[in-house]
Amino acid sequence: MAKLEFEHLLSPLRLAGAARGSLLQLKHRVVMAPLTRTRNDPLTYAPRHINALYYTQRTSDGGLIITEVHAKGGFVFSQLFHAGRVSHSHLLPEGVSPVAPSPVRAEGNAHTKLGKFPFEEPRALDSKEMEEIVKDFALAATRAVKEAGFDGIELHAGNGYLLQEFLAKKTNLRTDRYGGSIQNRAKFLLEVVDACVAAIGAERVAIKLQQGATFSDLVEPEDDSLAQLAYLGPQLQSRNLAYVCMSSLNYDPYYKFLGLEKPNFETDVFQYFRKHYQGTLMVNGGLSPQAAERYLEEGTADLACFGVLFIANANLVALLAAGKEMNLGGWDTKIWYGPQDPADDEKGYTDWPFVDPNNANAK
């Protein structure tokens, strides 16, 4: 019998420590990345029926989606983040302004329901406010699991959001116990992780890291980024989380979107982090199924997280299993995240034709 092209991607995996029992028994390792795509209600920002349809289309039996819906026997983790300096006063209650580790303004624009506006200079958080944010993360995790019915939560420490802002030298200029050394800059992130673990259990908590280059005007030097990962790896492994997602925008085409002439890292960040973290590792960032399969086969990763491929291939897992051609282009990036008439929300969102994996004429 011929070897299945994506044997490792389509093999089962038990999340969390087997010795402690497991929350999730995945039937394959193809994970859907968070892709809300600004299709929430334009006034309240609350999810609507079309959001549920979008994720239901992309759910597979025993598969993991990170964001918003149970269906077809799948599992779902809710991604939690604090936007930090890349929020805007138009997105916050009246009189409230963006906050960050330090008053370092991001270049670029915030997208609000009133239009695009330049990012504002954030106000530096004091220690009492940081304590409250830690509690808020734990409360959000509790509500996600115990009230909303999610299987777990993923803390987002990338995209230039607050948790990453504390890690990065460019955005963390503090001189207190949360600034300066690698250990100090990681302190706030680990406090958030520990609070969420205490609230809902380690097996329901995951985290996404994205050192190096990311959106929101944050490009970190390679030496400091790798030092962060060398420290965070053992720290996170000791907490026995559901998984760590190592996301990278250092690869083609993402570094080009960031205005970089070449990748920010010479080091393969996935292979590097694996040396420092032996728990369940998910990789994400412009991966082809073939590249993901290689990372799983060599032991670098345990799970592969796809974004763009899931946009145009709702039944991606079935297509991989059948070895059939996928929709690999034709999408319009302008309607991925840009505000539009809600009447047009299905365009490029839920209206992609399904490729029939049983079609004998397909590859």
Image (tube, grey):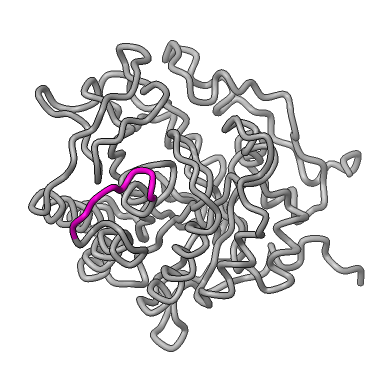
- Quarter of the picture holding the N terminus: bottom right
Q: Is residue 218 left or right of residue 182?
A: right
Q: Give the answer, above or below, for where 224 lies relative to 198.
A: above
The x, y position of residue 88, in whole percent, is 26, 25
Q: Which residues are magenta?
A: 169-176
Q: Nearer the viewer, residue 56 or 156?
A: 156
Q: Give the answer, above or below, for where 294 lies relative to 101.
A: below
Q: Is residue 24 left or right of residue 176?
A: right
Residue at (53% x, 44% y) in the render: 213
Residue at (48% x, 58% y) in the render: 224
Residue 308: in magenta span: no
Q: Is residue 324 in view from this perspective?
A: yes
The x, y position of residue 39, in whole percent, is 42, 26
The x, y position of residue 298, in whole percent, is 73, 72
Kindly indicate the quadrant of the structure image that contains residue 271: bottom right
The x, y position of residue 231, in whole percent, is 43, 70
Q: Is residue 131 left or right of residue 48?
A: left
Q: Main secondary structure of the magenta part?
A: loop
Q: Is residue 147 in view from this perspective?
A: no
- Quarter of the picture holding the C terminus: top right
Circle count? 0
